[in-house]
Image (cartoon, rainbow, N blue to C red):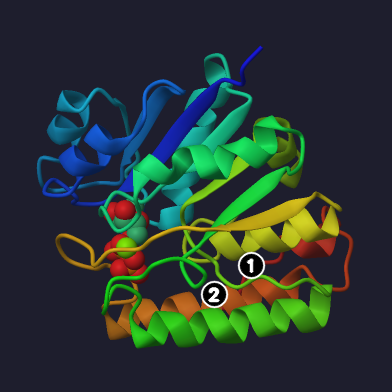
Amino acid sequence: MPPTIDVVIPAYNEEASLPLVLAAVPRPPVRRIIVVDNASTDTTARAARAGGAVVVREERQGYGSACLTGLAHLRADSPPSIVVFLDGDYSDSPEELPDLVAPIADGRADLVIGSRVQGQRQAGALLPQARAGNLVACLLIRLLYRHRYTDLGPFRAIRWDALEDLEMQDQDFGWTAEMQVKALKQGLSVLEVPVSYRRRIGVSKITGTVKGTLAAGYKILYTVLRYSGRRHGSDTANTQPPA
Ligand SMILES: Nc1nc2c(ncn2[C@@H]2O[C@H](COP(=O)(O)OP(=O)(O)O)[C@@H](O)[C@H]2O)c(=O)[nH]1
Ligand SMILES: [Mg+2]
């Protein structure tokens, strides 16, 4: 039986780009698209519905919050066998989804990260600060977890059951790193495949702003350190970062 594939798209004020993103998601193989409208003040929800997505609203801001809400929705109503995460800004190319899903469908991987570093990047798509942050985070993961990632990109696919076992918690910028390091701790088979990356449409909320970059950099490094050296799931892993 072919795997059931659902897509989760966290979206905060992405009315301009969402129609393009949704139109490019290949259906089939994708069964459902959940757009998590993260307290948008524009017409994101309307654009999502028009593009054939299910809209779930999450008032609590934060990338991880939005992803968690999307997963809760899937859990409550026939979870897929594979879930794909995709940003709503049209930086990623949803047409490449089959490349991310194939290794999982073939039983060769549990988690597949789309690497923008290995793929074709439009000039200026991956901002220098994002590139630098990625490099530092990947180096730290290599030192602490003995695995070589090249990117913490948002476009990724994971086997549903494996994701459930990760017990994801991060409510903002640590989300991608948390998934990657917990996957290593749990001995999942992880792969990277090259994905292309465009300059986003609309306004960047993370790496395009100083505040976003600093907050994301801090939270990512904190997350990488936090799960190293301890068994995931221990009580101490639940400590929150200092405010
Ligand atoms: N920063 C931020 N992004 C969110 C939030 N909720 C959902 N998103 C989405 O997360 C994705 C990544 O954000 P983006 O602004 O593209 O960050 P960048 O890629 O670093 O420029 C986009 O699809 C946003 O719409 C939130 O509360 N904060
Ligand atoms: Mg983006």
Mark closer to the chain start, 2 or 1: 2
Near-viewer residue (179 or 66) = 179
Q: Is residue 154 left or right of residue 166?
A: left
* Residue 243 visible from this viewpoint: no
- Measured in 3D between alpha carbons, the distance from the residue under mark 2 to the one under mark 1, in whole angstroms, is 11 Å
- What residue lies at 50% left-to-right and 83% top-to-bottom? 133
- Note whether 61 is above or below 80 in the view shown: below
Reading the image, the residue beneath label 1 is 240
Residue 15, quarter of picture: top left
- What residue lies at 20% left-to-right and 25% top-to-bottom? 49
Neighbours of disc 1 within 10 Å: few (<14), some (14-19), many (20+): few
Q: Quadrant of the N terminus?
A: top right
- Note whether 6 is above or below 141 in the view shown: above
- Report the label total: 2
> What amino acid is labelled 1 in the image?
Gln
For residue 219, the mark is 2
- What residue lies at 38% left-to-right and 30% top-to-bottom? 34
Q: Position of residue 36 (x, y in %)?
A: 34, 38
Q: Is residue 1 left or right of residue 210?
A: right
Q: Nearer the viewer, mark 2 or mark 1?
A: 2
Q: Position of residue 79 (x, y in %)?
A: 58, 21
Q: Is residue 1 left or right of residue 86?
A: right
Q: Secondary structure at mark 1?
A: loop
Neighbours of disc 2 within 10 Å: few (<14), some (14-19), many (20+): many
* Residue 6 visible from this viewpoint: yes
